Image (tube, coloured by chain):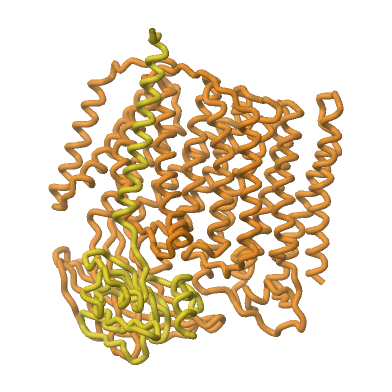
Chain colours: A orange, B yellow
Amino acid sequence: MLSNLGNLLLFLSAFLSLSLIYFSFQCLKESQELIHSKIFQISLVQSTVILACFFTLIAAFIISDFSLINVYQNSHSAKPLLYKISGTWGNHEGSLMLWVIILVIFSFLFLIKNKLHPKKFRLYTLIFQNIIILGFLFFILFNSNPFTSISPVPKEGLGLNPILQDPALAIHPPLLYLGFVGSSIYFSAAMAALITDYSDKSFALSIKNWVLISWVFQTLGILVGSIWAYYELGWGGFWFWDPVENASLLPWFAMTALFHSLIVLEKRNLFYFWVIILCLMTFILSVTGTFLVRSGILNSVHTFASDPGRGIYILSFLSLLIFGSIFLFFKKYCAKNYSINSNSKETFVLINNWFMMFYLLTILIGTLYPIFTDALTDSKISVGPPFYNAVIFPVVVAFLIFMAVGPNTKWIKNRFDNLINLIIIAVVAIAINFAIFYFFKSYTILSNLIIISSLFLIISSLNDLIKSIKKSNIDLARIISHISFGFLVFFIGLNHNFSIERDLNMRVGETKKFHNYQIKFKNLKLKDYDNYKAIIGNLEVENIKLGDKKTLNPEIRIYENPRTLTYEAAIKTNFIKDYYLTMSNIDRSEFYNIKFQKKPMMIWIWISVLFLTLGGFLRIFKNAKNN
Amino acid sequence: MLTKKVKKRASLLSISLIISFLAIFVILQSLKNNILYFKSPSDIKKNQELDFSKKIRVGGMVKKNSLIVQENEIKFVITDFKNELQVSYSGTVPNLFSEEKGVVAEGKLQDKKFFIAERILAKHDENYMPPELKEIMKKNAK
């Protein structure tokens, strides 16, 4: 029943998309400046239909309707309600539904929010957005339909992978998709701008909040994913340079470059074509990421069961996007002479963009290189964290310094009259750095430089804050985001330099010592839960120097549906450090594998990212108020 | 005669070109130094020019009854059903590491028969196998 209803609604939304495109072309032929109310209505109905369709799927998951293959494969009647619901988008087909919803809703909101912009621009945006919507609807209908039914109806579902049964992973996909898919709207807007020659600063006004919204959610999505990886995957890190993490970073860099360049387009009417390129690139990178993840080409944490048909479909859709946008771009491109002074805010924004492109290129090459060598030379290789660390971190030093200096420069032409100020800040930063390293006794040149430059950024942003409060024109959004980025790098630096890690094989009852620590393996308990059994270890970690004792309880969980073993890390968080301990059992032996880590400043890394997005939110509200 | 404006633009252009080339050069250089080759025990046996100082990844199955756990060390044998490699590892093993399951180990070869692993790679699904491993298994199962 739900299967028929779902399919009907899917076809209906495809039909509505087609009619939107048709009526938009009709409306373009007319000379009046107003958009037909018909178009608004269809767009609203389309949003309602697609939402109804999604709720149908959620309903199927809630009532465990195993007549749908998708529910059968990804759910189980004994699963907690929250994970039944989040299971809807925890799989390939359901997540595509989420894609389409965001595409449709953004399309509707962009249409009603931009009343001050020309009719042609708005209608073409609507047309391009609906072409994308149709592309994904066809993909869902003919390749990845979540409403495909199965007969005879199975009695019980196969269940959701236990490591996905987690609150962080319940909200991770929606957040990330708002970023990924949100970028579609300025892709469409950029295409529309090219067609209608809408090439001045009002184009920047029409998309700037959309860019910020997608950036904020992309950042939050990455953050939640990274927190999940930290406590769930059990290796104690928060970033692995896994191809999928990389896929989410690529559009992030493009977005960051984009909203910096947008400021220049808005204020100085420069860089129009560069902004267009960035708009197009962001969405193309998002789809590329989806392709890499869903086609099964890459070997990664996110193993959606792969199917070559999907890969081919997304690849052809991606090529269509790329060639379509390149064709339109060069048809409209005309060289413009931007004469900008080398010491001006414009230049500093360009420098920001160079850095972003450098990071983007590094990660793109690192991610794609293994695919090409595999296809061309038949040797299997992988590119791991050492590559990214070697390329990215040294460059961060210069980046942070430019980031500190840039915002204080003036438009058009700048003079460095605050040089002494900068030198004082640098001296203070260096002094604090040496204090830190003297105190903790650990030393590499690069980590010193990174900490100095991050302190430099933090202090000079604080300085800006004080100055602008005096003049009472505060750009709070910028200052908060820049300071938090400084803190982010600073805390990552401390975390990286002062972590302690130890692997031990221990029997129950044993005690082991290392550095200033002593670990006592007291006992094991067995406990039954609703959907799993747990072996719970009881370990006591003591810092001998401080006499501080903490009890940690790592778990080994045995799930039945589907049959899986997972290890739950025990984490004790406080304001200056995390203790992180995992326990695993080894075949046919009385030894347990214990991994103990001390991770300084972990919580501050998450908090810095939260504040980074807070800056984005503030800017969005300020823009909304000014319009 | 070049005008001042043209000169300025030319210098700006050449600077950005040089920077871009430098950036790409740096990226490719460190890529060359940091890639990890993936090999099966059979590849290692066949290969004449092995660089023992470089890290590699080795994949295969953990051989039945080969796992020995000691106080500071875990020993096991990786097999691809044709050739075998003895592995020594001192660290924690990821979820789902056990005998007769697929494994990918990262580390350095000591000689053609003995491998010291620094890391055992995590897998998150019991039926999941890295694509590289699947291919090897397919080839050798025949």
Place of residue A8 in the rendered image (x, y in percent of width and height, measured from the top left): 83, 62
From the viewer's perspective, is residue A316 above or below residue A489? below
Residue ID at (33%, 65%): A572
Q: Position of residue B4 (x, y in %)?
A: 38, 10
Whether A147 is drawn above or below A342: the answer is below
Q: Give the quarter of the figure containing the N terminus of chain A.
A: bottom right
Question: In this image, A526 relative to A152: left or right?
Answer: left
Number of marks present in the image shown: 0
Residue at image location 30% in from the left, 36% down from the top: A398
On the rendered structure, is A342 left or right of A188? left
**Taking the image as drawn, is residue A461 in sight?**
no
Residue A195 falls in which quadrant of the image? top right
Left/right of residue A552 with respect to residue A26 in the rendered view: left
| Residue A378 place in picture, x, y as percent | 43, 65
Give whichever of A559, B138 is nearer the camera: B138
Question: Dividing the picture into quarters, in which one does residue A485 lie?
Answer: top left
Q: Position of residue A31 (x, y in %)?
A: 85, 24
Q: Examine the rendering and report whether any part of residue A569 can be seen.
A: yes
Residue drawn at x 44%, y 74% as measured from the top left = B133
User: Where is A64 relative to A525, above or below?
Assistant: above
In the rendered image, the vertical position of residue A157 relative to residue A258, given as above or below: below
The C terminus of chain A, quarter of image: top right
The residue depicted at 56 percent of the width and 28 percent of the height is A273
